Image: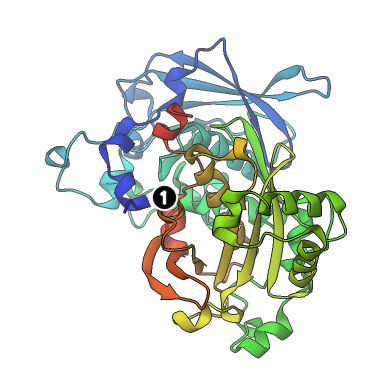
Amino acid sequence: MSSALTDLCSPASKKHPTILNETPPSSPRTFKFPDGEKISIAISHLAPISSNSTASNALSGGDKQAPTHKVSISSFAKEGEVTGNDFEFLVTPPLAPFPSPASEPNDNTFAARSKRCGIVHHQSGSSSGIDGQLLAWKVAQVFLTLWPSQEYFTFHSTSDDHALISQLVRSGLALPHPAEGENQSPSSTATALVSRAAFWQGKGFFEKTGKPIWILPKAQAYDLPPPTDSSLQPTSLSELKLLRPQKPSVSSGPIYSRYVEELGQTLSYRIVSSSNEEDVDTITRWHATERVNEGWRQRLDKEEQRKTLIATEKDASAIGLIGEWDGEPWGYVEIYFAKESNIAPFYNSGLHDRGFHALVGEEKFRGPHRVRSWMGSLIHLMFLLDPNTELVLSEPRASNTKMVNYECMCGGHVEKLIDFSHKRAALVMFPRERFFQLCPLGPLPQHVANK
C-alpha cells in the first residue's frame, strides 16, 4: 500500500518539477488568487546572479549555475487585457534533489538544508499601492505555485527592508534565516526563510486580514477561537457543543476556493441545500449510479435523498458540501466532528478531530490527477476552519483499496481496520503536522503527465 511519505521518496517523485524552465517568456501563465484576482505570470531567463552581488552568507544557497528567473506579475483588466507589470522579483532556483542516498551529505542541519533552497530577491516598494507584507505574501504564493515541492525558500530584501523581514517573522510566515546566526535579530537582517507549511496555514495573510485567504466570508461564522485563547477552549463534549458557533448559512456561494495551477481550474466547496432542487436532483442522480452506490449504498428516490440532506442540515456537528470545478458540481462531501460520530469508540478521539465522507459523482472529474487536489483541499479546509483541529479522519471501506491509496497520497496512513455494523473500514488518519509538512494539495507530476 502506498503512502504520501513513500511516494515523496520514490524515484518518480524526484523529477524536480521546475515549472519555470518549461515556460518560455512568450507564454505567460495565468493564475488566480483565492479572492478571484486574475494575474499573469511571465518568466524571462537572465544570467546567474553573481555571488559577489549577495549581501550575506545566507545567500550562498540556491543553484548559482542555473539561469536567474525574472518573474513579472500583471493583473487583468475587466476586459481581460493585461494591465502591465504590478510587481516583479528575481529567483535563484533551488538545487535539485540528491540523485541517490549515497550522494546525500552527513550534514542535515537546518542551516545546511537552507542553503539548498531557492532565493527570492525582492525589491521593497517595487509595487505602489500594495502593503509590503501582503505583497510579500503574494510573492510567496507565486513562488510556491512555481515550485510546489519546496518546503522553504529564502526571502531576501534587496533594499535591506529590515522592518519587512521582522514583520514576516512575527507573523509566523517566515523564520530567522539559520545562516544569519542564532543571535541575529530579524529587525537587523535582510533575509528570512519562508515556510511552505506556514504559508498554507494562512500565516502572514491571516495576521493582516483576520482569516486565511482560502476560507471565504460565508465560513467565518464557523471559526472557533485560536489555540492561544485558552480561556475559551472547551474541555468536554458538552462544553464544545455550547461554545460551537452556528454553522455557515446555506447560500449559493462557496466557503472555500483555491485555484489549482496544474489543472488550470478553480476548486471550491459550497454548502448543499435541501431546498435547492438542482442540488437534490444532482445528488439523487449520483447515488443512482452503480459506482457510487457500491460504496455509499444510498440509492434513494429524490424525496428520500432530500430527507438525508435535511438531517445533515439539522445536525450541528456535520456540514454537507458540494464540490465544484470552475462552478460545475463534481461531487458531494460531508465533514463532521469525530467525537460525535460512530467512529469515536474506535480510537482515542479528540474534541476537535474532524472526519469526512466523499463521493465523486461526475465521471469526467475522476482520476488521480484530480483526487489529490480536491481531497487535499478538503482536508486543508477542515484544518483551517478550526485551528484547534490536530487530526482529520476518514473511514472508507477496507475493500476499496483505490480510495485508501488515494487517501494515503494525501498525507494519510491506515491506523487499523475497524468494524462497523454495516462495513469493515480502514481507519485513515491525517495528522496536522504531517499534512502541512507534505502540503499534498495538487496532483503529483506523474499524474499530470498522464492525465
Q: Is residue 137 left or right of residue 95?
A: right
Q: Quadrant of residue 299?
A: bottom right
- Residue found at the far left of this picture: 102
* Residue 395 appears in the picture as rendered: yes
In the depicted view, which residue is nearer to us: 225 or 160? Answer: 225
Residue position for label 1: 409
Q: Quadrant of residue 353?
A: bottom right
At 75% from the left and 39% from the top, the residue drawn is 327
Judging from the image, what secondary structure is the residue with disc 1 in?
Answer: helix
Could you tell me how many numbered marks the image carries?
A: 1
Tell me if mark 1 has few (under 14), some (14-19) or many (20+) residues whose alpha carbon lies within 10 angstroms of its own: many
At 27% from the left and 41% from the top, the residue drawn is 10
Q: Is residue 317 above or below residue 256?
A: below
At 35% from the left and 47% from the top, the residue drawn is 180
Please identify the quadrant where the N terminus is shown: bottom left
Q: Percent position (x, y) of residue 150?
A: 40, 40
* Residue 210 appears in the picture as rendered: no
Q: Percent position (x, y) of residue 220?
A: 75, 62
In the depicted view, which residue is nearer to us: 84 or 396? Answer: 396
- Name which residue type carries label 1: Met
At 45% from the left and 25% from the top, the residue drawn is 19
Coloring applied to the structure: rainbow
Q: Percent position (x, y) of residue 440?
A: 46, 48
In the depicted view, which residue is nearer to us: 338 or 23? Answer: 338
In the depicted view, which residue is nearer to us: 127 or 450? Answer: 450
Q: Percent position (x, y) of residue 435?
A: 45, 57
- Residue found at the far top of this picture: 26
